[in-house]
């Protein structure tokens, strides 16, 4: 035996046998956790994919009603107002009456649940978010479906934990995170973005371990497989494939990122201000809440007839923008208009997300910036569409403060892999300037507001009325 072998043998002899066994078994995730992650991913994929189909069905049915039966009985404007108002009221009513935590995006609720501060009442969240989201998004309001799919995915993760009586707290946490990843993956056909969203954006709440990351990856992959079986394997956004820009033009992408970093901080502030405005307006009174929601929905029904570019989540608008159908001035006007409509819809508490509206805003301003840059620097081999794609990722990075997720999301949605370098530069510039200006991530702000609101409501209740809910919440958070 050589001296080196003797030294190794002596060192191993001093290490307790239990420590060696523990080290060797650290990567052995229980098969049951992985199998449950598969189930969570499949169910999240089905729910997320068919939620998109359901919203599309409502939107198409609304258009058919306007063009056939109802239009023959009522003036077109009146019919458009009434149909969208009824659809919006359905979403607002289901949320306010049965499941207040289903209002808005739903992502802060999942983050709060991962931190053990919010309950997950999946038996309420799933039907309310699905059918309420159908009404709100189907009415033409400027809302996205990715927030609802993330919340429903997380609810599915908790549902599976309860059905199979999972007792381990870490496993329940992993399945909750896996459901959230599966929800985002199904929303955008973006499995890598779904994984990274949980790891990066939810990093304060996510308990990173080999088991948890495996669960998240498996769920995201299975969810995307379900999406592709149902919808096909094409990218969500069909747009031109761009080549890599000249290196000398990367400074323009950095400038675009700086502008989005500044705007991202302003945009997050405007969202919270809009929520404050609507909270004072309806004062949590159901009648006022429904009246305001119906008026908003009706107005967007009318807007659909005359300025459809200002309505809807905005994903379908992105290819139209990149085809070059608008001048820079029109794009800036649409950008300003959609800021207002996004704040109006999301701030009102409707059950819908803000991902898609942000991507549309980034595309509008990015393409306008590209048109201006192309006119100022005609010698550079650049096209406005490159800046539109970079803008999508930059605004997401500036508001959500998750640059890697933004990069992956845009690349997977558009299949423009050659733009990864300008995307990195734009997103990095956006994040750095947003941080320099003291801005906070949007979902962290929304979670803080949710927890503050819940605390105020609990403080207002008599002591004897709060004991039972506390016991219920503690029971719901107990490992099973």
Image (spheres, rainbow, N blue to C red):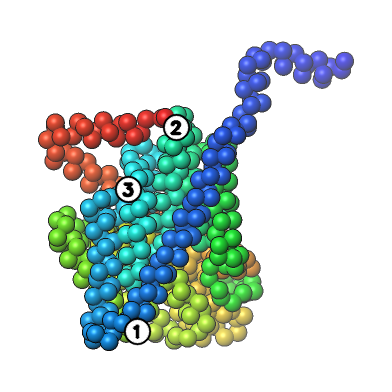
Q: Is residue 77 left or right of residue 153?
A: left
Q: Is residue 323 left or right of residue 80?
A: right
**What crowding class fits label 2: few (fewer than 14 Cα within 10 Å), some (14-19), or many (20 or more)?**
few
For discs 1 and 3, the disc positioned in front in the rendered view = 1
Residue 220, relative to residue 205: is it above or below?
below
What SS does tag 2 mark?
A: loop
Could you give the CA–CA distance between mark 2 and mark 1, rounded to whole angstroms? 51 Å
Residue 403, relative to residue 334: is it above or below?
above
In depth, the one of 366 and 148 nearer the eye is: 148
Q: Is residue 452 left or right of residue 131?
A: left
**What crowding class fits label 3: few (fewer than 14 Cα within 10 Å), some (14-19), or many (20 or more)?**
some
Question: Pointer 2: what residue?
Answer: 165
Sequence-first disc among 3 and 2? 3
Sequence-first disc among 2 and 1? 1
Could you give the CA–CA distance between mark 1 and mark 3, rounded to whole angstroms? 35 Å
What percent of the width, then of the height, locates residue 306? 32, 85
Question: Pointer 1: what residue?
Answer: 67
In the displayed orientation, state which residue is furthest to the right: 1
Residue 194, relative to residue 240: is it above or below?
above
Give the residue drawn at x 50%, y 55%: 46
Residue 166 shows up from this direction: yes
In depth, the one of 54 and 421 nearer the eye is: 54
What percent of the width, then of the height, locates residue 67? 34, 84
Q: Is residue 139 left or right of residue 192?
A: left
What percent of the width, then of the height, locates residue 347? 27, 62
Question: Pointer 3: what residue?
Answer: 124
């Amino acid at each position: 035996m050589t001296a080196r072998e003797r030294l190794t043998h002596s060192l191993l002899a001093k290490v307790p046998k239990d420590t060696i066994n523990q080290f060797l078994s650290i990567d052995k995730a229980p098969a049951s956790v992985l199998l449950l992650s598969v189930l969570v991913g499949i169910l999240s994929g089905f729910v997320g994919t068919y939620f998109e189909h359901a919203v599309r069905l409502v939107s198409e049915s609304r258009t058919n009603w306007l063009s056939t039966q109802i239009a023959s009985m009522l003036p077109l404007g009146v019919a458009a107002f009434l149909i969208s108002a009824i659809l919006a009221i359905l979403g607002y009513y289901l949320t306010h009456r049965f499941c207040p935590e289903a209002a808005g995006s739903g992502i802060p609720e999942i983050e709060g649940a991962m931190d053990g501060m919010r309950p997950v009442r999946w038996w309420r969240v799933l039907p309310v978010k699905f059918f309420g989201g159908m009404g709100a998004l189907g009415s033409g309001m400027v809302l996205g479906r990715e927030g609802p799919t993330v919340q429903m995915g997380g609810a599915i993760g908790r549902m599976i934990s309860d059905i199979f009586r999972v007792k381990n707290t870490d496993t329940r946490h992993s399945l909750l995170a896996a459901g959230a990843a599966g929800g985002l993956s199904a929303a955008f056909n973006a499995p890598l973005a779904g994984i990274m969203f949980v790891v990066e954006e939810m990093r304060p709440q996510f308990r990173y371990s080999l088991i948890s990351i495996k669960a998240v990856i498996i769920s995201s992959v299975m969810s995307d497989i379900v999406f592709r079986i149902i919808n096909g394997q094409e990218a969500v956004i069909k747009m031109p494939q761009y080549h890599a820009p000249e290196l000398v033009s990367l400074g323009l992408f950095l400038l675009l990122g700086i502008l989005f970093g500044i705007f991202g901080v302003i945009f997050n502030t405007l969202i919270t201000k809009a929520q404050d405005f609507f909270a004072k307006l309806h004062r949590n009174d159901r009648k006022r809440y429904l009246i305001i929601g119906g008026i908003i929905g009706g107005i967007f029904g009318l807007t659909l007839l005359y300025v459809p570019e200002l309505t809807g989540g905005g994903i379908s608008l992105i290819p139209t923008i990149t085809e070059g159908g608008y001048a820079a001035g029109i794009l800036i006007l649409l950008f300003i208009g959609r800021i207002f409509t996004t704040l109006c819809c999301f701030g009102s508490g409707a059950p819908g997300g803000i991902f898609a509206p942000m991507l549309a805003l980034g595309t509008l301003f990015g393409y306008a910036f590209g048109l201006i840059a192309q006119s100022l620097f005609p010698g550079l081999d650049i096209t406005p569409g490159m800046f539109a794609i970079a803008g999508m990722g930059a605004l997401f990075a500036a508001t959500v403060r998750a640059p890697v997720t933004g990069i992956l999301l845009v690349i997977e949605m558009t299949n423009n892999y050659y733009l990864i370098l300008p995307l990195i530069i734009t997103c990095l510039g956006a994040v750095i300037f947003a941080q320099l200006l003291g801005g906070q991530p949007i979902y962290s702000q929304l979670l803080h507001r949710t927890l503050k609101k819940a605390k105020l409501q609990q403080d207002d209740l008599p002591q004897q009325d709060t004991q039972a809910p506390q016991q219920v919440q503690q029971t719901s958070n107990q490992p099973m």
